[in-house]
Amino acid sequence: MGNDLWKLTAANITDGIASKSFSASEVVRSHLQHIEKVNPKVNAIVTLDEEFANLQANEVDKRVKDGKELRPLEGVPIGIKDTTAVKGIRTTHGSKFFEHHVPDTDDIIVDRIKASGAIILGKTNTPEFAAGGNTFNDIFGATKNPWNLSLSAGGSTGGGAAGLAAGMFPLASGTDLGGSLRIPAAFCGVQGIRPTVGLVPVGPKNLPFQSLGVSGPMARNSHDLGVLLEVMAKPHHLDPLSPGFGFELTQEKNHKELKLAYVNDPVCIGIDNDVADKCEKAVHDLANLGHKLEIIEIDFSEGREAFEILRAQSMVNGFLDYVEKLDQMGENIAGNIKRGLDQSSLDVARAEVTRGELWKKLAAVFTTYDALVTPTLPITPFPFEENYPKKIDNKPTRSYIDWFSTTFVFSLFGVPALSVPAGLSNNKLPVGLQIIGPHFSENRLLRLAKNVEELFPIGFPTID
């Protein structure tokens, strides 16, 4: 089994280490050997720290030998997004400005990941400053989709999703402002959850009150996803949006049926027929398990413009020190900042009003239904050389982020949203199903994700 340990889930690994079926050092060795084989093709991990990984593994093995209490992720390898600070490991943000940057402190979630016993292998690829739904930058190049190396892995946590799908690690951390956990999860056939805003503390950061961006976990199954979320989600005094409680993964004793609303195109952008067919089959199969399903019509298309305005404003807020250096930045991030500088206070005010009106509409959905289900994305992966798809359903997209408005409109409301594979398309590419719930309903979403993963197992891709 030693050479195949990279195929195990996080739960398999912790169980095996606890029973002394294998050691953490053997787990790390198997993953490093597999990374050496597949990462040159996929380009998911951009900074690999083998020495640190082996050091952590040795510490885990010593804990086991000494009979110490084992931690929730003892010996489980994890990839950390290259926008998240890890002390002593290069963290570039995908930007030439930070090409040689090595942090001297850990991000809050990294501190918690280390305390959980997980083994950090290194940093995963991201577009410049995590701006965009396709993962490429001028330092490391593009991350490829393990299901088809000519296609995009999505973004901005593309390195994390591709690494998971390719078996480089069973867990990954990421961020999500407009869909950066859900988009690559859908494209690569893994799971990612955007938690309720504040549930996972973010920072230290300069803008602690911003409410669009979050950090969160990715995994290949719902149980591992929930365990990593539990590790991440605890209150922290430096995050003013952090509630006075964390997240506890629970197994519901009463598996009552849930009432689900499904909408095929919540933002009126169009949808690929194959994607629509797979997602509709998935929700009907959920209904066959006992959940109640209603197909509804609801229009969140006004959120497309509102989100783009508020996102542009947040980019200006976050990059004040760079407004005179836009010519040194890529077109995606620079274009966002320029838009934020050009728009008016009236534009921002109207966007906030629209946000409030749309929230009333979503809140009304949750008074009747336990969850809202949509396709995560309206398309399957496109060629990685393309910044973004120029058309959806033969209609032109109006910006480089418009194509994933199915994810970003729900970022406006601070609610949890999860992407889970709903099987493979006719051309053998993953299709993601998005499940959205009320604030702090993460356990409900994870339960539904487990239902879906059991209905539509897709396994590992063959990487040519």
Image (tube, rainbow, N blue to C red):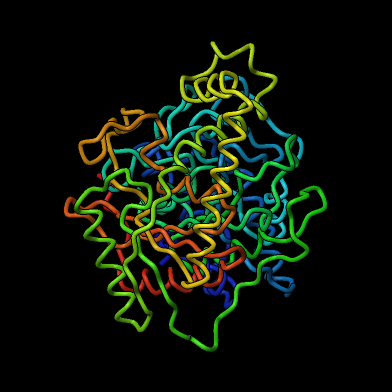
The quarter in which the C terminus is drawn is: top left
Q: Find the residue positioned furthest to the left.
A: 426
Question: Residue most toward the bottom?
Answer: 254
Q: In this view, does 417 lie above or below 125?
A: below
Q: Can residue 288 be seen in this view?
A: yes
Image: 206 above or below 252: above
Q: In which quarter of the image is residue 67?
A: bottom right
Q: Is residue 306 found left or right of 91 in the rendered image?
A: left
Front in this rendered view, residue 104 or 194: 194
Q: Which of these two is toward me, 415 or 36?
A: 415
Residue under the point 70% across and 64% down: 62
x and y percent of residue 91 in the render?
62, 33
* Whole-percent x, y for residue 371 in the image: 46, 68
Residue at figure coordinates x 64%, y 68% from the top left: 72
Q: Where is residue 417 in the image (x, y as percent from the top left)?
A: 50, 58
Q: Which residue lies furthest to the right in this view?
A: 237
Q: Is residue 96 above or below residue 413?
A: above
Identify the residue at horizontal 71%, vertical 65% (top origin).
246
Which quadrant of the figure has residue 39?
Answer: top left
- In the rendering, at what x and y percent does residue 362 appear? 50, 59
The answer to whether residue 150 of the structure is visible from this angle is: no
From this view, report whether residue 225 is shown above or below residue 334: below
Count of marks placed on residues: 0
Quadrant, the N terminus: bottom left
Residue closest to the eye, 81 or 185: 185
Residue drawn where x is 58% and y is 67% of the image: 227
- The answer to which quarter of the image holds residue 459 is bottom left
